[in-house]
Image: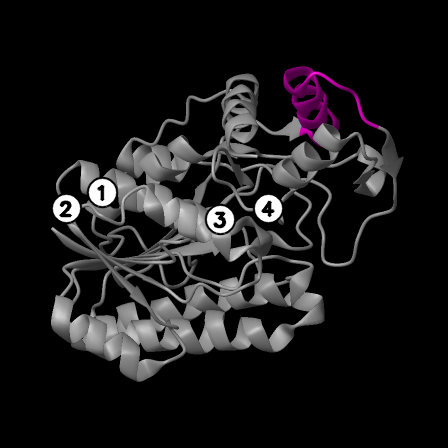
C-alpha cells in the first residue's frame, strides 16, 4: 500500500516507517524537524531507512495546509498514520501556542486532506494523558475523559473529537491510539528513560517526582509498532451495537474507534530506575520531589478492546525492554 506517515523523524514514526518498508509498503514521510529536542537524533533515526527505494521524505509542517495538500495530491496515499505532534506535557505549560499550531491546526489540515484524498483509513496518535484527573485504574476506553490536566492532553482529546466529526460527516474511517509511556532504542531525550540513563551514566543525581510513588505502564517500542500496524490494517467500521441512548465513549455509529495501546503491566518508576542502574552498572542519588503540574500519579492501560479487535498482545517485559534499551544507549551515546 501507499502509506503516508507523519513524524517519521520521531521516535515512533521512524520505527513504524522501518516496519512498513520491511513488509513492502511504499511510504511518504513528513516531518518538520523542529528543535524541541536535538535534531541530530532525528537525522540519525532517518538515516536508518532514508535510502530505502520505497521511502520518500518531505520536510514540511502540518500547519502548512498548502504543503500538506500538495503531498496528498502527488503521493495519493491509501492509508495515513499521523504521529507528528508537539509532544510533552511540561513543555505545554511553557509554549502553549506550539501545541495549538501542531496538534490542532495541523491535525485539522490532515483531516481535510484525508477527506478530499479519499483516504481509506486514518490512524492517529492520541495519548494516555487524556485520562487526566481520572483515578479509576486501569484506564479503559469506556471511561469518560473530560478532565484533562494539561493543554497537551486537551489537544489529544480534541483530536479524537475532530476525527469523530469527519468520520460522522464524511465517512472517513479513523482510529485513535492512546499511547502509554513508550520507551526503547532511539527514544525521545526529553522522556524519563533517556534523561535517567544520561544522568546515571554521568553519576549525576536524578529528580524523582511524586516522591517516587509514580507507576507507569511502560510499553516497549516493538510492541507499540506491532499494535499500530495491526490497527492500520483493520479499517475502522461503525459499531453495530452502538446505542445512542447509552453511548460507549470508545465506539460510534460512525467508522471511528479509539483504543488504549500499552503494556497492561504497570511498574513503579523506582523499579524502572533500579533496572537502569543494574544494566548501566552504577547507582544514582535520587532527589525525591513533589508532583509536577500537569502530571498524573499512575497510568495503566486496559487493552482488552485492542486485543479483541486486532489481536494485540504486548509481550516485552520491563526487564527485557530496559536491557535492550540500555544496550542501544551504550552504543549510541
Number of residue marks = 4
Determine the CA span between mark 4 and mark 1: 24 Å
Determine the CA span between mark 1 and mark 3: 21 Å
Q: Secondary structure at mark 1?
A: helix
Determine the CA span between mark 4 and mark 3: 9 Å
Q: Earlier in the sequence, mark 1 or mark 3?
A: 1
Would you say 226 lies left or right of 302 here?
A: left
Q: Which residue is mark 4?
A: 189
Determine the CA span between mark 1 and mark 2: 5 Å
Contact between marks 1 and 3 (CB within 8 A): the answer is no
Q: Which residue is mark 2?
A: 25
Q: In this picture, which residue range is highlighted in magenta? A: 268-284
Contact between marks 4 and 3 (CB within 8 A): the answer is yes
Q: Earlier in the sequence, mark 4 or mark 1?
A: 1
Contact between marks 1 and 2 (CB within 8 A): the answer is yes
Neighbours of disc 3 within 10 Å: few (<14), some (14-19), many (20+): some
Q: Quadrant of the C terminus?
A: top right
Type of secondary structure dominating the magenta stretch? helix
Q: Which residue is mark 1?
A: 20
Q: Secondary structure at mark 2?
A: loop
Q: Which residue is mark 3?
A: 41
Would you say 87 lies left or right of 268 here?
A: left
Amino acid at each position: 500500500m501507499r502509506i503516508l506517515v507523519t513524524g517519521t523523524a520521531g521516535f515512533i514514526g521512524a520505527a513504524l516507517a522501518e516496519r512498513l518498508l520491511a513488509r513492502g509498503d511504499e511510504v511518504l514521510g513528513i516531518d518538520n524537524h523542529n528543535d524541541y529536542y536535538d535534531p541530530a537524533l532525528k537525522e540519525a533515526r532517518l538515516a536508518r531507512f532514508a535510502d530505502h527505494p520505497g521511502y520518500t521524505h518531505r520536510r514540511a509542517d502540518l500547519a502548512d495546509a498548502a504543503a500538506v495538500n500538495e503531498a496528498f495530491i502527488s503521493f495519493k496515499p491509501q492509508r495515513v498514520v499521523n504521529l507528528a505532534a508537539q509532544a510533552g506535557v511540561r513543555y505545554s505549560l511553557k509554549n502553549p501556542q506550539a501545541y495549538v499550531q501542531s496538534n490542532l491546526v495541523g491535525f485539522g489540515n490532515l483531516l481535510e486532506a484525508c477527506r478530499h484524498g479519499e483516504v481509506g483509513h486514518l490512524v492517529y496518535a492520541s495519548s494516555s494523558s487524556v485520562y487526566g484527573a481520572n483515578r479509576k485504574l486501569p484506564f479503559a476506553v469506556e471511561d469518560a475523559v473530560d478532565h484533562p490536566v494539561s493543554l497537551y492532553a486537551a489537544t489529544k482529546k480534541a483530536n479524537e473529537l475532530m476525527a469523530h466529526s469527519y468520520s460522522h460527516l464524511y465517512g472517513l474511517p479513523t482510529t485513535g491510539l492512546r499511547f502509554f509511556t513508550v520507551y526503547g532504542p532511539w527514544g525521545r531525550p526529553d522522556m524519563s528513560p533517556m534523561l535517567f540513563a544520561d544522568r546515571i551514566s554521568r553519576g549525576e543525581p536524578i529528580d524523582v517526582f511524586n516522591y517516587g510513588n509514580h507507576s507507569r505502564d511502560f510499553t516497549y517500542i516493538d510492541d507499540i509498532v506491532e499494535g499500530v500496524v495491526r490497527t492500520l490494517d483493520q479499517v475502522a467500521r461503525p459499531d453495530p451495537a452502538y446505542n445512542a441512548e447509552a453511548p460507549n465513549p470508545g465506539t460510534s455509529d460512525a467508522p471511528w474507534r479509539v483504543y488504549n495501546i500499552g503494556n497492561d503491566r504497570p511498574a513503579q518508576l523506582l523499579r524502572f530506575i533500579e533496572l537502569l542502574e543494574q544494566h548501566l552498572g552504577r547507582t544514582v542519588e535520587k532527589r525525591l520531589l513533589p508532583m509536577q503540574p500537569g502530571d498524573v500519579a499512575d497510568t495503566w492501560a486496559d487493552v482488552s478492546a485492542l486485543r479483541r479487535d486486532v489481536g494485540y498482545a504486548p509481550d516485552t517485559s520491563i526487564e527485557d525492554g530496559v536491557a535492550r534499551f540500555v544496550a542501544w544507549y551504550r552504543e549510541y551515546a
